Amino acid sequence: MTAARRLVANRENARRSRGPITAAGRARAAQNARRHGLSRPVRNDPACASDIAALARAIAGAHAGAEELALAGGIAAAQVELMRMRCARREGMRARTR
């Protein structure tokens, strides 16, 4: 009996958890990343360029060549992107509690 009720509840929750249904709702949801500034790649953001370069130098080391520095640049860009997403998430949570 419990399994049948749980199955019905799961299906009901799944039906409600599929995101926006109307065209207007889908269009609004499609802009979420742009609203938070996360749709722009971090490498295209001039404000992050110095952070990426400094982190890449720290990752590659003092005696790194051009290839090592380029690879470290990819790692640094990914790390800065993660930090940017975490910051946006934190700000979003703060906004909800206000």
Image: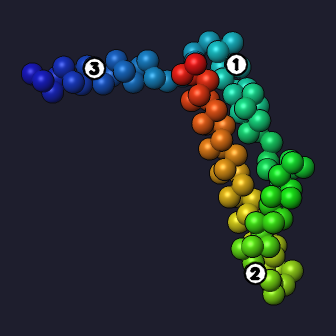
Image quadrant in which you'd find residue 98: top right
Q: Quadrant of residue 4?
A: top left
Task: Return the residue found at the far right.
Answer: 46
Q: Secondary structure at mark 2?
A: loop
Graded by Cα atoms within 10 Å as few (under 14), some (14 to 19) or many (20 or more), the crowding at tag 1 reads few
Q: Residue farthest to the front?
A: 98
Q: Earlier in the sequence, mark 2 or mark 1?
A: 1
Residue 22 picture location, percent across and down: 62, 12
Q: Amino acid at mark 2?
A: Gly
Q: If the image is split into quadrants, where does the N terminus sit? A: top left
Horizontal side of 59 relative to 20 (left or right) equals: right
Q: Position of residue 34 (x, y in %)?
A: 76, 31
Rendered position, 59 above or below 52: below
Foreground mark, 2 or 1, reads: 2
User: Is residue 90 shown above or below 15?
Assistant: below
Identify the residue at image location x=61%, y=36%. 89
Rounded to the nearest angstrom, the CA distance separating label 3 from label 2 is 55 Å
What kind of residue is marked 1? Arg
Which residue is under mark 2?
61
Q: Amino acid at mark 3?
A: Ala
- Residue 66: x, y in percent? 87, 80
Q: How many marks?
A: 3
What residue is pinned by disc 1?
28
Mark 1 / mark 3, whichever is N-terminal: 3
Q: Residue at x 81, y 66 (%)?
A: 54
Q: Secondary structure at mark 3?
A: helix
62 over 14 or under it: above or below: below
24 vs 54, left or right, is left
Looking at the image, which residue is at 33% across and 22% down? 11
Residue 38 x, y percent position in the rendering: 73, 39
Residue tagged 3: 9
